[in-house]
Amino acid sequence: MGMNFPMVPAPAPAAGGTPAATPAPAPQGPVVGTTQQKVPGAAGTTANLADLGIPTLVVADGPAGLRISPTRPGETRTFYATAFPIATLLAASWDLDLVYQTGLDMGSEVKAYGVDVLLGPGMNIHRNPLGGRNFEYFSEDPYLTGKMAASIVKGIQANGVGTSVKHFAANNHETNRNMINVKVSPRALREIYLRGFEIVVREAAPWTVMSSYNKVNGPYTSENPELLKTVLRDDWGFKGFVMTDWFGGRNAAAQMVAGNDLLMPGGQAQMDTLLAAVRRGDLPEKYIDENVDRMLNIIRVSPTFLGHQPSNNPDLKGHAERARKTASEGMVLLKNEAATLPAKPQPVAVFGNYSYDLVSGGTGSGDVNEAYTISLPDGLSGAGFTVDAGLRTLYETYIVAEKAKQPPRRSFFAPPVIVPEMAILPKDLKKAASTNAMAIITIGRIAGEGGDRKVQDDYYLSAAEKQLIADVSKAFHAKGKKVVVMLNIGGVIETASWRDLVDGILLTWLPGQEAGNAIADVLSGKVNPSGKLPTSFLVKYEDDPAAEGFPGQEYGPEIDLGRRKVRASEITYQEGVFVGYRAFDKRNIAPAYEFGHGLSYTTFGYSDLKLSSPAFSGSVTATVTVTNTGKVAGREVVQVYLAAPGKTMEKPLAELKAFGKTGLLQPGQSETLTFTLDARSLTSFDEGRSAWVAEAGTYTVKIGASSRDIRAQANFTLATEQVVERVNKALEME
Ligand code: BGC
C-alpha cells in the first residue's frame, strides 16, 4: 500500500448491527434500520454539512426492494414498500426489459420515500450453493450477472436516484465475512468475480459501489487502491463514489487513500482519526480532496440536493401487479412428467409447512417491510382452486402453536425460526388422497445475511421432508393422482434423490409479496413458465469444487469482540475460473438440472442458424429462428455459448456470451433473434500480459435451450491472435 497508517478501531454495532472486525468503543453513528431522522429504517445517512450547503443524503437497502420502517413514531399512516422477487428469480427470467421495469418501480419507491441511494443490486457470484446471501445475487455466471445488474441499475437510476452495486468484491459467502481473506487468481477475478461489476460500471454507470467486508489477496477490499482505483476507476472508468459496507475495514486512513470515499455508517472515532492523521501529515490532504470531490459530484445530482420533496405515496398497487407478473416470469419448471401441469385439480390437497408460511424474501438487509404476502392457499383460491380446508386447518394450527413455543428472535441477524416439518397422520393422508384430485407439497428454505446455509437438513432435505414427499406420493399415486412439489427457496437444494417420486417440480424461488398469486398463475396455466436456471442444481454437494475448503480455514489468535470471539481465516478459490457450469462441464459431472434448464407448457424448435461471416473481424452476428412447435403460447429463453480455442490458456468447454428471450409466441409462430459477439466475447484473461486475449483458431457458437441442450451450432475462425484490451497489473495473489 506504500503508507503505514495507525489502525482505527471500527465502531462496534448496536443491537442489530453488523459485527465489527475489531474491539471498539460504543457506536457513534446510525446503524442498520434505526436512528434515522429523515427516513426511519433507512440504513444510513451522509454527514449533515448544512453550513456548507451540503445536505444529508439517505441511503437504504436493498436488492429486493426498498427497506425502510413501515411505521413512524407519531404517524398513523404506513410506509410500506413493495417486496419484489429476489434477484435470483429476476435472473431466471433472462428478461432484461422486465428487470429494467422492476428497477423503474423500485427506484420510484426510493424517490417517493425520500431516499437518495438504494443499496443494491447485490451481484456477487453464486460460487457455492451454501452462500447465505445467494438469493440476493443473480447467478453463477458473470455475464448474466452483469447484464441483469446493468438493467436494474438503469431502471432504478432513471428515476434520478442512485444505486450502490455490492459487495465489491469476492464476498461469496457469509461465514467470518469481516475477517476472511479470499485468495483468488487475477484471471478468476477478472473473468468471474469482477466481470459482472465491470459490465455494470461500463453499461449503467451506477452512482456508487459498495466495497465488501472481506480481504482479497491480502488487504481489505475497502483499503485496497488496486481494487478501488487501478481496476475500478483506471481500467473501467468508474466515476461515482465508493462506500464501505457497514463498519467494513479497519483502517480509515488507508480507506481514504484507497479511494473508499465514504465510511458507513460513519462514526466520530473514524473522523477524529482522519483529522489527526491529516494534521500529523500522515494522510496527505489531496486524498481527502479527491474523496470529497467524488462524493460532491453525486450529491449535487441527488434528489435531496435538488430539493425533491418526498410524496410518500408510491404506486404500490401498480408495482404489486407488476411484481406478480415478474415473479411468474422467473419461476422455473424443473420437471413436468406427462404434462402434469398446467392443472386445475378440484379440490387440491396442499402439504408442507411452507405452503402455509410462504417465504417471500430472505432475511437481513435483503428483506423488505411489505404490507402483505399472498399465501399459497389464498393465491390458489383467488385463481379458482378449491383448497382442502381440513388440511389447511391442521397445518395452520400446528404452525401457530410451534411458533408460539419459539423464543423471540434475538437480533436482526439471528437465523429465522424453522418450524419442524409437520408429520401427517396416516388417516389424514388417506382421507386427503381419496377426496382430492392432486397434491401440492411445498419445500421451503430461508436464509440471509450473516450466516451460510448447512449441508444437512438444508442443502439436503430433512428426513421429515423426505418422508412427507414419499408418503404423499405413495398415497396419491395409489389413487392414480399426481403430486407436484414447489420449491420455495432462495438457493440450490438437492433434488436428485427424491425427484423420481413426484410428477412435477416448480421452482418458485422467493417470489416477493405476490407469491401465492404468482404461483397460482403458473400452476393454472394463466402464465406459461419461461424461467431458466441462472445457477446449476447439483446432484451431490461434494460435486461442486467450491465445496473443498468451504467456508475457509481459521488461523492465528482469537480476537475478543466482547459479545463473541473471532479469528482470522482464509479461503483459496482453487478452482480458478471453473465455477458453476464451467466446473461441471470440465469435470464431466452431470448436474441434476443444468445451468439454463427450464421447461415450458409448449415446445420450441430452433432453425436457420446463420453467422454473418465464417471469419471474425471486429464482431460476428448470429441469427436463429425459434418456432413454437407446441399447442399453447409461450416464450423461450435462447442462450448463446461460445467454445473458444485454448492453446495457451485452459478454457471452459463453453461460456455464456449472449442471450435473448422471444416474445409470447402463439403455436406455430416464429421469431428470429440476433446476437452480436464482439472481440471481448472471444477473450480470456492472460495473466502474464495482463490483457484480454483472443486466441487464433476455430470458435464454435452454440445456441442452446440450456447449457446442455444445444440446438444448433456453427463455427467461425480467427486468423491471428488478438490482444483485445490491455489492463493494469493488479490484485496478484500473495
Ligand atoms: C450489508 C449490506 C447492507 C448494509 C446496510 C450490511 O450489513 O452487508 O449489504 O447494505 O448492511 O444495511
Image (cartoon, rainbow, N blue to C red):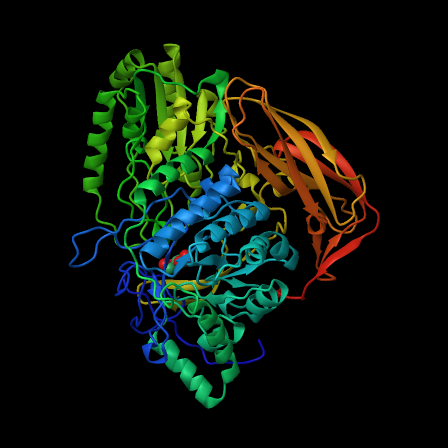
Q: Position of residue 520 (x, y in %)?
A: 36, 27
Q: Nearer the viewer, residue 116 or 502?
A: 116
- Numbered-mark total: 0
Q: Nearer the viewer, residue 316 or 166?
A: 316
Answer left or right for 658 relative to 615. left
Asked whether residue 342 is in view, the answer is: yes
Residue sitting at x 39%, y 20%: 483
Q: Position of residue 344 (x, y in %)?
A: 36, 18
Q: Quadrant of ligand 1?
A: bottom left
Answer left or right for 254 relative to 323. right
Looking at the image, the residue that sits furthest to the right is 719
146 above or below 663? below
51 above or below 212? below
Q: Position of residue 52 (x, y in %)?
A: 36, 80
Q: Nearer the viewer, residue 212 or 83?
A: 83
Residue sitting at x 24%, y 25%: 392
Q: Name which quarter of the figure residue 423 lies in.
A: top left
In what quadrant of the picture does the C terminus appear? Answer: bottom right
Answer left or right for 139 relative to 647. left
Q: Name which quarter of the figure residue 723 lies in.
A: bottom right
641 above or below 722? above
In what quadrant of the picture does the N terminus appear? Answer: bottom right
Q: Position of residue 624 (x, y in %)?
A: 67, 32
Asked whether residue 548 is in view, the answer is: no
Answer left or right for 6 relative to 587. left
